[in-house]
Amino acid sequence: MLTLKVKDMSCGHCVATVTKTVKGLDPVAEVATDLASRTVRVESGVDAAAITAALEEAGYPSERV
């Protein structure tokens, strides 16, 4: 389980983009977002570095919690 803090995630559109970005790397990934705390939990076989790099490229830099 990977937990990330995504400071720029502030609305439903952001949540959708973050989820779509992770699912683009791993279509069977489980993605749970908490907009209030701006955290994303990802259950995936994809490397954490690849996920954070893809999120940054999509405009949502993140840091591991």
Image (cartoon, rainbow, N blue to C red):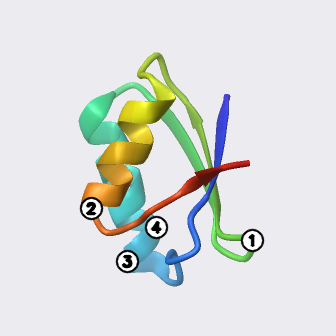
- Name the residue type under label 1: Ser
Tell which tag, 3 or 1, sits nearer the viewer: 1
Q: Label 2 belongs to which residue?
A: 58
Is the C-beta separation of discs 3 and 4 under 8 Å? yes
Residue 60 location, x and y as percent?
A: 40, 66
Q: Residues within 10 Å of mark 3 (few under 14, many from 20)?
A: few
Secondary structure beneath dot 3 equals helix
Q: Label 4 belongs to which residue?
A: 15
Tell which tag, 1 or 4, sits nearer the viewer: 1
Farthest residue toward the top? 45
Left or right, residue 10 beside residue 39: left
Residue 16 location, x and y as percent?
A: 38, 64
Q: Residues within 10 Å of mark 1 (few under 14, many from 20)?
A: few
Q: Label 1 belongs to which residue?
A: 37
Marks 3 and 1 sit apart, C-alpha to C-alpha, by: 16 Å
Q: Residues within 10 Å of mark 2 (few under 14, many from 20)?
A: few
Nearer to us in this view, 37 or 52? 52
**On residue 13, which mark appears?**
3
Marks 4 and 2 sit apart, C-alpha to C-alpha, by: 12 Å
Q: Eyeballing the image, is 48 above or below 19? A: above
Marks 2 and 1 sit apart, C-alpha to C-alpha, by: 20 Å
Secondary structure beneath dot 1 equals loop
**Which corner quadrant of the image does residue 35 belong to?**
bottom right
Position of the N terminus, as image quadrant, is top right
Q: Earlier in the sequence, mark 3 or mark 1?
A: 3
Residue at screen point 50% across, 24% down: 44
- Name the residue type under label 4: Val
Q: Residues within 10 Å of mark 4 (few under 14, many from 20)?
A: many
Is the C-beta separation of discs 1 and 4 under 8 Å? no
Secondary structure beneath dot 4 equals helix
